Every structure is written in C-alpha cells, then in structure tokens.
Amino acid sequence: MKIKVLVVGCGDRATVYCHEGVDNLKQMQVVAAVDPNPERLRYMRENFGVAKNMCFDNIEDVLAIGKIADAVINGTMDSLHLATAVPFLKQGYHMLLEKPLVNNKADLLHLKSVAEQNNVKLMTCHVLRYAPFYRKVKELIASGTIGKVQNIQTSERVGAYHSSVSYVRGKWASEAECGSSLLLAKCCHDLDLICWLNNTTTPVEVYSNGDRTYFTVQNAPVGSGTRCLVDCPETVRKNCIYEAEAMYIKNTVLPWYPWQCTGKNWQDVTEEEKYESLKTNNPHGRCVFKCGGDLLDHQNVVVRFGNGSTANHMVLLGAMKPTRTIFVSGTEGEIEGDPSGELIVRKFDKNTDFFTEEKIAFDDKQGETGGHYGGDRGLVADFIDYLCGKTPSISCTDIADSINGHLTVFAADKSVKADKPVTIDYKADDHE
Ligand SMILES: NC(=O)c1ccc[n+]([C@@H]2O[C@H](COP(=O)([O-])OP(=O)(O)OC[C@H]3O[C@@H](n4cnc5c(N)ncnc54)[C@H](O)[C@@H]3O)[C@@H](O)[C@H]2O)c1
C-alpha cells in the first residue's frame, strides 16, 4: 500500500522526503503540490508525476477541493508553518511538519491541541532521532546499559560553509525576518535529542548565554569591500575564508542554497548566471562580516530536569570541521561519540582499570552534506509506518513527544535576553 501525500512548500526539504518515500522506499505517492514558485511545481510534475491540475500556487485553492490525500508534507519556511499547517490538520490530514514547528510556546501548544482535537498524527522532522548513531544511544539508555542518566553534554560546531550559507548570509540570517533564533533554527534538533534521550523526565529550568562576536563589521578584514566580487580587492579576498567565489562557485557542499534567490532550480543555473548573481543581488555575494544579521554566533545552554539530571549544549558558527558530539554520563556507565565516527560505551569493571570500553563504528560520513547521517530516510519510513497503524518506533517524533525540545529552546533564548535561569511552566500564556 502507498500513502498519498499532498506537498505544501516544495523546496529542498520537502522534496528530499518525497524522493525517500517515492523513489527509495516506494511506499508514497505524491498526488498534489502547493508552491507559489512555478519552477518548484514543475519539479514536482517532472520528478513525481504530479498532474498539472493538482499543482496549486496557494493553499486556499487546494483546501477548497476537500481532502485529497492521507497526509501533508509541509516543507514551508519557518514562519509559515503555523498558517500552512492548522487548516490542513483541521481538514483531517495527518502531517509531517518541518522543524522548527513554530517559534513560540503559545503557538506550539495550539498546534498540538489542533492535532489532538482533530485526531490526526502530527510528526516533526527531527531527523537526527532516526540516524542509526542516535538511535543506538537511545536504545542503550532505554535498556539501562549505563544506569540512570546524570548528565548529557552535546555540542554542535557548524562548519564555516554551512554557517555562512545558512545563518550569516542565508535565509536564516535574521531572526527578525525569518522568525527563528540560531538555537531554534539549528539546535532545536540537539535540544530535542537531549529531551528525547532523557524522556523519563522533563526539562524544568534552563540557563543560557551567548553572543555574536565574530560575524561583525569590526572583524571585517582591513580594506575589504561590501560585495566580494565587486569591491573587495583581490589581495583581501585571497586570505578570506568566506570569499564568495571560492565558497559558492568552486565548492560543491550544500550546492542548492546559494542559488535559491535566482528562483531557478539550482541545477539549471549556469556558471555565468552564478557570477552575475553574486555580483548583483545575491545575498551570498555580500561580505560575510557586513551582512547585518542578528543571530548569535555562539551559545551555551544548561538544562535541569525534573529528576535532578542535567544537560549542556554548545553551538558555534564558523568551525573548521563540522561536528556534532555527545557524552552521556550514567550511574553505571557512559556513552561518548560523534555521529560520523564511532560510539564508545564504557562500563564500570572491578577487574580491569575500572572500566571496559566497547567501540561501535558508524560509517555514514555524510555529516552535514546531506542525509542527516541516515536520518532522512528513517524519518519518512517511520512516518509511513505510523500512518499505516504500526506501533510507533522508539524515535517517533509525534508532537506529544517533540514539544519539550522546542520549549527548552524558547526558554533558553528567553534566558539569554534576561541573563537569568528561566522556568519551563508549560502554560500557554506567552509568545516568547
Ligand atoms: N529537518 C532538518 O534537518 C531541516 C534542514 C533544513 C531546513 N529545515 C527546515 O525545513 C523548512 C524548509 O526549508 P527549505 O530549505 O526546504 O526551504 P525552501 O525555501 O527550499 O522551501 C520552501 C518552499 O516553500 C515555498 N513557499 C513559500 N511560500 C509558500 C506558501 N505560502 N505556501 C506553500 N509554499 C510556499 C517556497 O517557494 C519554497 O519552494 C524550514 O522550516 C527549515 O527550517 C529542516
């Protein structure tokens, strides 16, 4: 049996999920698509055989014809999630909704209650829960291998390229414009992992600090211009990590992001058009230090849980080597590793030098360049299973188990501004 999906927001993420469901898992059929960009609708017709009369440039027209699929894959940008999710949930569609679900507590709890009232399954795209690495960590904790969790430490060092193309020059560069802070856009995954791994309890208090100290005009190289290929001297450019030609034309990491502003599918943009775009109106052509974004470029979060356990997360933009790490300390053992390398499980042992060590290799080296360490496919497979009535997997990102990470992010960002710990009280009484 194939599940029928309607895709709302046919951009990068939604089409990744469609390729997984249609081409790789062969358990999904895309029956309709909504996107104001005609190029994206063309992509849906050509890649998934969506009929021309089932392509819509706005959600109202498809809502007007009633329920036409089992589920919606909602891959719109962050600030559109609530408005493009609620009407479909009310019409009885199940939904796979991109993260961040929304950007404040009141909207999050509203979204959850709409899904519950309409008896529909709402999963979010916390793809890392499905990466074999993190799933193994979860299984080890759930099986009691390391005893009771005392502390979880995670870090995310976002590589220079990804930092620049997404959070400094890119579409998440400004919280004021896109609605998401750095922690919400990048680390709602990590805070979700922490809360999911430790979900025999709930987060109760958060303290966070952070700043933007690197991507500032004061750090622009002496003599630099405002647009790399227009007014920045060659002598300056050649020593700049973030120089646009090397970063976006010569590199091929995350190749779709720099050219989205052209309105064309990135594969169709010619080299000549790329140069012209970087020289004129492409935001990625601007000096990385003079973009004027408002996101923090590093942040620390400390979480206290109801059972007394704690967690720490650190995120940093501009790392040389993109990496996520985790260390879980339990009463009878510990787990350490990074998802593109190996997982180490240590257990107390009286007969050796105090502990034994088991190493488990994870060979998915895709890291930040795609696939989320294998999580994308696992998420889609689980969504299909969940819709087909199978028992949800240990990773299942149903909204009921996905709100704690988001609430922790909201509290952390509030804490940065207030410079004091913030209590998570679960009341829908504010929009912060
Ligand atoms: N799960 C993850 O790891 C992950 C990774 C990257 C991005 N994301 C999230 O996925 C979401 C989409 O990101 P993306 O990079 O795919 O964005 P995108 O810009 O590639 O796709 C968004 C699409 O929505 C369309 N759109 C705009 N207004 C619309 C409307 N009113 N109705 C329907 N469609 C509309 C746009 O034309 C575009 O095609 C974001 O919320 C982002 O934060 C998640």
Image (tube, rainbow, N blue to C red):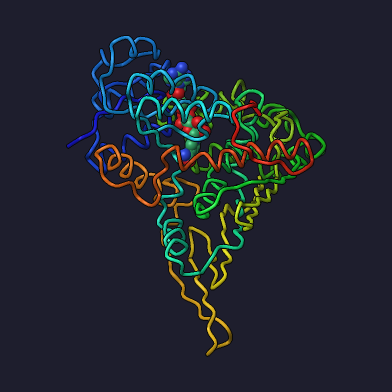
Q: Is residue 273 left or right of residue 104?
A: left
**Residue 248 in sight in this render:** yes
- The spot of residue 270 in percent (x, y) is 45, 28
Closer to us: 155 or 255? 155
Point out the residue furthest to the bottom here.
351
Q: Residue at x 56, y 59 (%)?
A: 326
Task: Work out which quarter of the rendered image holds the C terminus and state it.
Answer: top right
Q: Quadrant of residue 11?
A: top left
Q: How many marks?
A: 0
Task: Name the foreground residue: 96 vs 32.
Answer: 96
Quarter of the image for residue 317 reads top right
| Residue 333 percent location from the top left of the image | 54, 72
Q: Quadrant of residue 138?
A: bottom left
Viewer can see residue 270: no
User: Which residue does the image show at 44% across and 30% down from the upper left?
Assistant: 266
In the rendered image, the vertical position of residue 215 relative to residue 347, given as above or below: above
| 374 relative to 150 in the view: left or right | left
Q: Position of residue 250 (x, y in %)?
A: 53, 41
Q: Work out whether 55 lies above or below 137.
A: above
| Residue sticking out furthest to the left | 1
Comparing 46 with 205, the one in front is 205
- Left or right of 2? Residue 314 is right
Residue nearer the viewer, 395 or 310? 310
**The N terminus lies in quadrant:** top left
In the rendered image, residue 386, in percent from the top left (x then y), is placed at 30, 41
Residue plotted at (53% across, 37% down): 249
